[in-house]
Image (cartoon, rainbow, N blue to C red):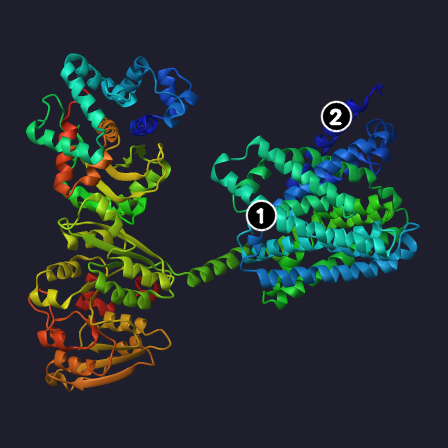
Amino acid sequence: MHFGATLRLLRIDSGLSLRDLARRLRVSSAYLSRVEKGLDAAPTPARLADVAKELEVPATLLMDLAQRISPLVVDYVERVPDAGSLFLEIAHRNLNAAQLAEVRAMLDERFPVARPAGLPRGAALADLLAPERIVLGLSGASMEDVLDLAAGRLAESLPGTDAVSLARLLRASEAEVSSAIGGGIAVPCGYVSGVGALAAVVVLNEALHYDTPDGQPLRAVMVLLGPRDDPGRRLVLARIAGLAARGMAEALAGAQSAEEAYRWITHQSYLPLDVR
Amino acid sequence: MPHFEFNALTLLLAQISSVLVVSRALGMITRRLGQPLVIAEVLAGIVLGPSLLGWLWPEAAVALFPAQSMPVLQMLAQVGLVLFMFLVGLEFDARLLKGHARSSVIISHTSIVVPFALGAVAGWWLYEGYAEEGVSYLSFVLFLGVAMSITAFPVLARILSERHLLGSRVGAITMACAAVDDVTAWCILAFVVAVARAQGLQQALWTTLMALVFITVMLKLMRPFLERLGERVASREGLTSALVVLVLLLLFISSTVTEMIGIHALFGAFLFGAILPKSGRLAEMLIEKLETVAVLLLLPLFFAYSGLRTEIGLLNSTQDWMVALALIGVASLGKFGGSTLAARLTGMRWREASALGILMNTRGLMELIVLNIGLDLGVISPTVFTMMVIMALVTTVATTPILALVYPDRELARDRLRDGRAAEEEAPAPVTAMVCISNSDRGVALATLAGTLLARQNAHIYALHLREPSDSPSAMLRKDTDTEDGPLGPFLRRMGKQNLDVRPLSFVSSEPAADICRTARAKRASMVLLGAHKPLLLESSLDGTVSEVIEQAPGTVGVLIDHGLERIQRVLVACAGDPGDREAVRLAARLCSAPNARLSLLYIRPPRRAADAEVPAELLELAGPEAEVKAVVHPSPATAALAESRLGYDLVVIGKHDVWGLSGGRFGLRRHMLAESPASLLVIAGAPAAADAAQEAVPQPPAAQTL
């Protein structure tokens, strides 16, 4: 996951220009641009808190994205030393993505996560998604095909819209700025007023070569649709970025059915990433 | 006047400043008159030179441009010219010739040969009175010939873009001609310079030989190197300052070598620019970097320099002015006449041809460059130089107003419309078709069908393969079975042989019919082709998919029941007097548009309607004049069609209709027809709108748009 690219998408989503945000943060727009391009280190926690305030997302979420190891993990290991040794064991065994997915499946089965009480409706990706809007195993596709496919699914859930104009909308915003946030994930956003927020997910079978900020090929595309100014969607976007850093692409590629992928996303998006 | 003390540097700076000020001031006037800036710059030189300033206020002229400062100015101007000629070479792009190569080569060569010949005649006529002593007859004649055949590519490009002519046919051909002209004229000039400089025939031959070696080295060794350099710029690095220095270094080496060989330094600069690759962004970025200094700063110095050498006072007799006038006439006659005639002969209309001639007659600053070379070499005298400068000015100034007269904007708009319409007809809006492939063994048959149907069309074809969720193994395994060797493999390979643009698309779907329709809608496919297996239809396990697609898909749906379809040469289209027949006949006719394919139309009437008229004229028209037409009376159209289909057809096409055995909304043909027909069967279901009974009233859109 690329922090800068995620920050840029969040900024664009909130309708702020580079210069606007830089002025509000009292930094130079050149510095902000470097951060967005990943040429400069992520801002300090104090500054991140300012950024979070401007973008209307929880500060802890941004800090989680900006750091390689989530502060949640650090906290937890400090509180429960036993957990630290479990992490160590996983590290010693050098588990790969598929094996980790197995461990995760076991965890999900034994200790299912409930929807956290404080999570507002519409703030989790799972709230916007349904198994019918998950396409698995797409191959031979270009970004346009992906958007067309997602538009077809979204149009069915939105009476009164048609796939062609939705696809045109998504293509246009994608042409303006690449929505890839690294970690093999892209989050194209389309703005349609008068409808509730909605998402579709397309999982690619063969990685798509696309302009991604970290050079990793694209593995999954989450299309978000909704009204222009919606802090809830930015929350979803930031959470997707968090998931991208936690092996979302691999997990989705391993899913056997749309229901399975949906289950994974539900579990993950209920994890209280931003509650400390 | 107050007395200024100038040292060499302050003098030079003052000279540059005054040149810039005067040329910009004149530029404001010429722009208002609709003339290119070049005119102002040339005039600025003349104004500051002996022709005006030196005549009105000799003291100022001497103070500002003393004779001893001339070499400095000249050197700066020469460096500017080297850079400028490099830029001119950079503008030369072989891709300009694309599509006009034949006509532009003919026109431009004619437009060189004719004025060259006329110029040579003029040279023969002027040699007695106007050649300097010691100038060889040959070089004088050759030089006048070259000087007459120059076209100014840069000025031309500017005039064309100002008049919005660049996109038109005339504009494109003129640009191509001027580009060819430039190359040819500079090659000839290089040769003429070699002849003029050489002491004898032997040395001239030696110079020519060296020049050929130089050109070969540039083309064979330098160009591949530059191409690699261009790729590097295109890929990542961008144009670093080290690269700019490298290019400049190579440019100056190339110039130096040509100067030492004896064909002017400018030729080396031009050639180097011309061989630089234009496909990447290298050329563009170099132009951007160098243009400011070369065109805005150094080029005016050249104009000033040549203006300072233009002494209109030298033309002091009526005879001189008559000669200058004659030169203008000869130059225009040769260039304008030659290119207009050649353009007309290549098939342009008179108006377009003469517009091209007028444009080609623009000489602009390229002529000045050539003239300065001649003056430096001593081939032409200052008098002839002045005459030719006037000629260059007049032909350039005349271009814009005469062009407006001959080719007014009204005509231009009309021609552009005509060009546009022609272009539209040539390139129909691309058809989008989607072919759904579920099993590898039908890939070949569907490819044969789609390939024949969409051949010679600018079609986008999507090959869609939907996998069932259950049969998708782990992600790693799936990777291997995709596109190349997977179910799409045979289809893609077959289509690849026919050079059709196919884009594979494959994903997991639990509701294939809905996904086919959704994808078709999102891709705006006007046609969906899919296969149906006999057993599937008979056992009606999956026919739900096919019938759902027929009901919901946005465009025409073709269902292929394959009985080993590998080639399409004999096609039978069976009609039973149903609105759906139209689409079936239309597609069948399209399938048979290949020269070796034959279409038969079978028209079946039930006995109770035996008294009906003949085969509807509409169907006959759609089937085309070469189709074989049979009309029979039979109570069961399916049986009659089956009997006919046994007669060695590759493919039977029918419209989806109940008479063929479709019933109860479920798609399925009569068992005996399906099982026994030796030919493959294509069932066409029209778009919902076309299936309406009222469709006769709707005019059929052009075939190219609906397929």
Is residue B167 something one can see in this rendering? Answer: yes
In this rendering, would B70 be left or right of B513? right
**Residue B490: percent from left, percent from top:** 28, 61
Q: Which residue is mark 1?
A: B224
Question: Looking at the rendered structure, which numbered label has been put on residue B366?
Answer: none
Looking at the rendering, which quadrant does residue B38 occupy? top right
Dot 2 and dot 1 residues touching (CB under 8 Å): no
**Residue B533: percent from left, percent from top:** 15, 66
Figure check: A125 above or below B1: below
**Residue B87: percent from left, percent from top:** 64, 42
- Name the secondary structure under disc 1: helix
Q: Which residue is mark 2?
A: B13
Figure check: A52 above or below B249: above
Q: Residue furthest front?
A: A92
- Name the secondary structure under disc 2: helix
Residue at the image position 61 percent from the left and 49 percent from the top:
B92
Is residue B34 something one can see in this rendering? Answer: no
Subunit ID for the residue under disc 2: B
Looking at the rendering, which quadrant does residue B284 occupy? top right
**Residue B438: percent from left, percent from top:** 20, 58
The N terminus of chain B, quarter of image: top right
Q: Amino acid at mark 1?
A: Pro
Residue in front for this viewpoint, B470 or B169: B470
Q: Amino acid at mark 2?
A: Leu
Subunit ID for the residue under disc 1: B
Residue at the image position 86 percent from the left and 32 percent from the top:
B67
Residue mark closest to the camera, 2 vs 1? 1
In this rendering, would B391 be left or right of A108? right
Figure check: B266 above or below A46: below
Disc 1: CA contacts within 10 A as few (<14), some (14-19) or many (>=20) = some
Looking at the rendering, which quadrant does residue B688 occupy? bottom left
Residue at the image position 86 percent from the left and 45 percent from the top:
B382
